[in-house]
Amino acid sequence: MQPLHHFDVQDFLKHYWQQRPLYIKQGFSHFVDPIDENELAGLALEENIDSRLISFHRNRWQVTQGPFTDVNALCKGKWSLLVQGVDQHCPPADALMQAFNFLPNWRMTDLLVSFSSPGAGVGAHIDQYDVFIIQGKGSRRWQVGLPGDYCEQRPHPNLKQISAFEAVIDVEMHSGDILYIPPHHPHNGIASAFCMNYSVGFRAPNPQEMLASLADYAAEKHIFTERYRDVQIASRSRAAEIKLQEIQAIRRSLEDVLYSPHFPQWLGKFLSESNGLAIEPELVDGSYNESNIREMLLDDVVFIREAGVRPIFFEEQDTDLNEFNFYIGGQGFSVPRASQTLVKNFLNQQEFHLENKNDQQNCLFFTQLLTKLVSAGYWYPAQ
Ligand code: SIN
Ligand code: CO
């Protein structure tokens, strides 16, 4: 992992995160690009990878969605190739995201990588989410403005831009420079030379998508099916009237859903949905079982977390039962609470080997857990 320089985490969280844009000159000193343009173009050919080519040619914007068979054929005029979720396919790209681990896994989505020709960009626009844009090789002029009432334009049906904005940051970014842009801040990057950019993206769910997901979860699990009851129903003179106490009772029944034991299970799955989803079951080696995993653990074999896997778990609270739960790719895992310290350490590390092999109980649960995780393709032994 390349560490961040010229950057004070506490100061950033207090004064900039979700508030103000920030330019961090040489945030990475001696920055090494985690991927090159040829590898990026290779990813853009793949079926399950989201890629786009945005170009400005003969005074026209063009957006072409991947996968591509021949990227070069579309690289006319000024163009940018953008590939989403590169962290899930490229371990060094995943490692680059880990420099931002002072922000929680559940808020991070993925790494978008772009390669642009001189003069290219996607135009001035506004995003709904926070982003850190890292300049890779080459250089690019970046401008950032403040939130406002901007006029949206669509020079192509799949391209949202805005007209003009006044820049409060206007910098020529070189390899290793970083720009933090909070949501709703207009920005524009115009490549000064062939260049790579890495955007660490974040998610911020809204109540509408959470309610829709919770409803789907409830329907699938057949929960929250109890109907409205009113044993002491209020009398009324007008049948059309709904009593305030009835509105209250309905509101309370919905609130009960949010405090039920099912709620954290849904939330863990919902918030982890995209953190590890790219693993294709058919590519996972199915030859692992508890006995060979146990042998490897005792032999000090290192287990490596697959790229793009970002587990999440809830802060401990007094009401927690006997189990410790964590979530990856919309899937829940649980271990006895007694093993939670070991498991939390394990989840936090990119590479892990079992240090204390004498704790029989822990060793047993851990072997079972690791077998599940290796079988799901989230970890693999380094051999
Ligand atoms: C890009 O790298 O061209 C896109 C970054 C952005 O969202 O502005
Ligand atoms: Co943007």
Image (cartoon, helix red, strand yellow):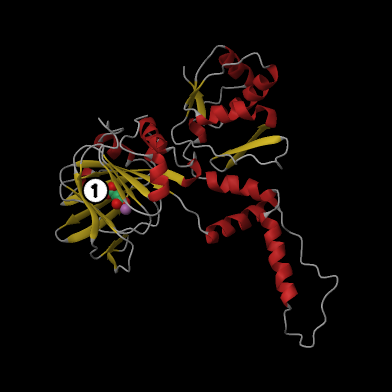
- 343 in relation to 119, above or below: above
Q: Is 121 rendered above or below residue 286?
A: below
| Residue appearing at x 46%, y 39% in the figure | 278
Q: Is residue 182 in view?
A: yes
Residue that badge 1 annotates: 80
Q: Is residue 263 left or right of residue 46?
A: right
Identified at 40% across, 40% down, the residue is 9
Q: Nearer the viewer, residue 375 or 184?
A: 184
The amino acid type found where label 1 is placed reads Ser
Q: Extreme bottom residue here?
A: 237
Q: Position of residue 108 (x, y in %)?
A: 45, 44
The answer to which quarter of the image holds residue 168 is bottom left
Near-viewer residue (178 or 201) = 178
Quadrant of residue 252 in the image? Answer: bottom right
CA neighbours of label 1 inside 10 A, class few (<14), some (14 to 19), many (20+): many
Q: Position of residue 231 (x, y in %)?
A: 85, 70
- The one nearer the camera, 51 or 210, is 210
Where 304 sits versus 42, above or below? Answer: above
